[in-house]
Amino acid sequence: MTFANVARASRRLIATRPTQVCTNCSPGGAEPAPILRSQHLGWRITCPLCGDQLRGPGKREIPSPFQQYRSAALRDEKLLDDEAERGIGTWTSPAEIARLLLMRRIPRPFPREDDLWRFRVLGAIIPDLDHVVAEQGENLPTPAKPILPLHMRPALLAGVTIVERAGPEMLQMLSGHMMGDNRVRFTNAAESMMARNRIWKASSQMHLI
Ligand SMILES: [Zn+2]
């Protein structure tokens, strides 16, 4: 199985080991089932072959606390799939947005120092996130390896959809939730995405002429 043709920005979203399974396409049994490509893809919540909901390791189904975001999440699943597998982008790279959304943010009022680790930019757009993370003691992954556990994944996917729909201005707004070096890193990344957007717009206008 090769991932060499996957777009560069999306490679961080590929797990080194299978992290999920479709019980329809890999029913299991006495024989060890072959590993399917989709088992490594950190942006999938459904099986690309049959459309069934993927399940986590051990085929357990953990209900997602983000069910209400399912349709937004499915839209981003497609955006990320188009980017990774077919090199089709929109005004931005959905995989890059996923990374930015996992950076730390500083909420107001300022929390206790011990609690700072759990606040991510994503929580500024998905209001239930802070609460769920606190309740489950779930430490979300860092932007370096932005693969969320399956039941948390709809929140990140929906967050990317919201930013993608809102456009570059939303990135500017989100930088207001950050401080210090993190804010600089976020702003720099957002600016380079916006620059790419201008080039993208210019080139798509060229195609129209
Ligand atoms: Zn399947």
Image: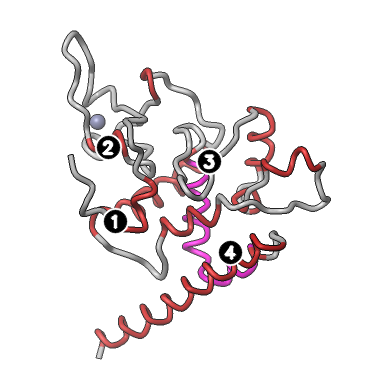
Task: Find the distance from the CA under tag 1 to the CA under tag 3.
Answer: 23 Å
Q: Which residue is mark 3?
A: 141
CA gap between label 4 and label 1 equals 24 Å
Which of label 2 and label 3 is nearer to you? 3
Q: Which residue is mark 4?
A: 186
Residue drawn at 69 percent across, 33 percent down: 134
- Mark 2 vs 1, N-terminal side: 2
Q: Are marks 2 and 3 in contact (CB under 8 Å)?
A: no
Structural crowding at the residue carrying mark 4, measured as other residues with C-alpha within 10 Å and reported as few (<14), some (14–19) or many (≥20): many
CB of residue at label 1: within 8 Å of ligand 1? no
Q: Residue farthest to the top?
A: 30
Q: Amino acid at mark 1?
A: Asp
Q: Position of residue 144 (x, y in %)?
A: 48, 49
Q: Earlier in the sequence, mark 3 or mark 4?
A: 3
Q: Residues within 10 Å of mark 2 (few under 14, many from 20)?
A: many
The quarter of the image that holds ligand 1 is top left
User: Which residue is drawn at the image coordinates 37% and 58% (left, top)?
Assistant: 9
Q: Few, some or many C-alpha atoms within 10 Å of disc 3 (few <14, some 14-19, many ≥20)?
A: some
Distance from the alpha carbon under mark 4 to that under mark 2: 30 Å
Q: Is residue 165 magenta?
A: yes
Residue on which disc 1 sits: 82
Q: Residue at x 46, y 78 (%)?
A: 195
The answer for how far apart the CA atoms under marks 3 and 4 are is 17 Å
Secondary structure at numbered mark 3:
loop
Residue range highlighted in magenta: 154-174
Image quarter of residue 83? bottom left
* Helix, strand or loop for the magenta stretch, by majority: helix
For mark 1, give the secondary structure: helix
Mark 1 or mark 3, earlier in chain: 1
- Badge 4 marks a residue whose secondary structure is helix
